[in-house]
Amino acid sequence: MNELSVILAFGLPDELVTPIRDVSPRLRVVRLSGGERRAYRSGRTIWYAYAEQRRPEKETDQEAEAGLARILTDAEVLFTSPLMPANITDRAPKLRWVQLTSAGVDRLLDGDLAKSGVTITTASGIHAVPIGEYVMGVMLAFAKGLPQAMRAQAERTWRPYLAEELYDKTVGIVGLGAIGGYVAKLAKADGMRVLALRRSTRSRSTGEAAGLDDVDELLPLSDLPYLLSEADYVVIAVPLTAESRGLIGERELRAMKPTARIINIARGAIIDEAALVQALNEKWIGGAALDVFDHEPLPPESELWGMENVILTPHISGGTPVYMERAVELFCDNLRCYLAGEPLRNVVEVERGY
């Protein structure tokens, strides 16, 4: 029985490593040490919802580099974040499959990995609940006037106002994947009208005709202007690709209602940030909730920080205390498929960009 080398590129605790090892006795599961992880990331830092367990490390940088080199030489499967060595295929000549902890692959598409033929799978689907709840949360925050109420509280000022309802409002979801689908489910449960745009859709149809109970109208990409003109809340939930980069610019923002709010939980580059700042300043739209930005962290000089019609969060919408548990569960399912020679979940099509 051939041994299969599986590398864990982050500091998972024992209770999450055990289910990976239990998938098969064929697996030789190697968890990188703290020094090896730092060498692997080449000094780059990444935030995890499940914090790494830190323990004293006595290895020198040279020992860590040497240890990492030995481990990668035999690696067939790599469980990792998108922040990996640029020359990973050279350092891991036996690599056949990379399982990412992220849903997005835009950081990898220009690198050697995407051109190598190595299978890449994502963690698409595990973000649906936290991001769906985030979207509903910011929509409710806008509707109930919570940003201005919190400012009044900080100023110890009593300023009554008339709150809105989400019921019977229209939400337009640009990208009906796992996240967009969960947003649709939550919005429909609150009595909202749901429009959804999906890249693979060729013509406009009702959700019922498409077998989507939580969608009122399913739209092709060509119907983006219609979605923008109808929606009270526009949710950006598409992956960043060559096609979606700059998808929302001046023309699209001007197509929105002056009372509408836009919510971006995808990637900052999908919206033209300069055009968005102008739209917010000149009141083309009613507001924005942004969890992602062109440059992260968002620079202190950005005008977005001081805008009263904007809710900003530091790329946390997908975070949850059970993030890594869900990622490990998906990885274990894919490991079983890999060992059985069955199709893997969430395989990236490099040409498509996700």
Image (cartoon, rainbow, N blue to C red):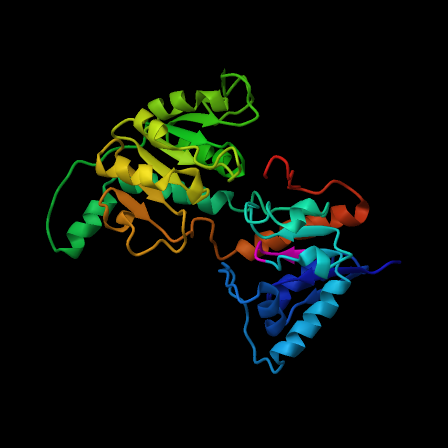
Camera sees residue 143: no
Vertical order, 245 against 312 (above or below): above
Q: 341 or 222: nearer the eye?
A: 222
Vertical order, 119 against 76 (above or below): above
Residue 151 horizontal/vertical position (percent): 19, 51
The C terminus appears in which quarter of the rendering?
top right
Vertical order, 269 against 74 (above or below): above
Camera sees residue 172: yes
The N terminus appears in which quarter of the rendering?
bottom right
Magenta range: 78-83
The residue at the far left in this view is 158
Q: Residue at x 53, y 54 (%)?
A: 323
Count of numbered labels shown in the rendering: 0
The residue at the far bottom in this view is 58
276 horizontally vs 181: left or right: left
Residue 152 horizontal/vertical position (percent): 15, 50
Q: Is residue 80 magenta?
A: yes
The residue at the far right in this view is 1
Residue 176 horizontal/vertical position (percent): 51, 32
Vertical order, 170 against 203 (above or below): below
Q: 324 or 11: nearer the eye?
A: 11
Residue 288 horizontal/vertical position (percent): 31, 40
Q: 339 or 214: nearer the eye?
A: 339
Q: Residue at x 57, y 25 (%)?
A: 200
Q: Residue at x 79, y 50 (%)?
A: 339
The quarter holding residue 92 reads bottom right
Q: Is residue 337 magenta?
A: no
